[in-house]
Image: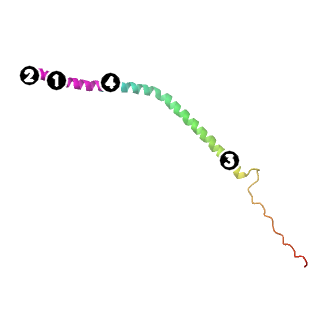
Amino acid sequence: MERPLITVLLLVGLVIGCGVGSAYARARRSWADYQTIKKSVPGARRAAWLLIRAVTTKIGVIALLLVGAVAYAAVGADGESAQPSPTPSVTPSERPGR
């Protein structure tokens, strides 16, 4: 009667031990990964800000070029203001013989 009870207890202990051991190993790996990522965050943050600065600089240059192009088109190519030009008037011709 003792032998089957010991066998069952041994199997239950092995199953519980495997579960606890795998959970412990997963926790150790997670802690190591966390520490690695924690050390790399300042560098990644710095790189992200540099990329954001580069993108905003490019957007600013493009916006200035667009504003300049619109101002150039509004003023005109030769610097004259945009005024309507006079249309030629038709002069009535006199009938010959009168």
Q: Which mark is residue 88?
A: none
Q: CA distance from mark 2 to mark 4?
A: 36 Å
Q: Is residue 78 left or right of residue 65?
A: right
**Dot in front, 3 or 2:** 2
Point out which mark residue 9 bears. Answer: 1
* Mark nearer the N terminus (3 vs 2): 2
> Which stretch is magenta?
1-22
Q: Earlier in the sequence, mark 1 or mark 3?
A: 1
Q: Residue furthest right?
A: 97
Question: Judging from the image, what secondary structure is the residue with disc 1 in?
Answer: helix
Quick check: 81 left or right of 42?
right
Is 20 magenta? The answer is yes
Residue behind mark 2 = 1
Residue at numbered disc 3: 69
- The percent position of residue 93, horizontal first and vertical second, equals 86, 72
The amino acid sitting under disc 1 is Leu
Whole-number angstrom distance, CA of label 1 to CA of label 2: 13 Å
In the rendered structure, the answer to whether residue 44 lies left or right of residue 76 reads: left
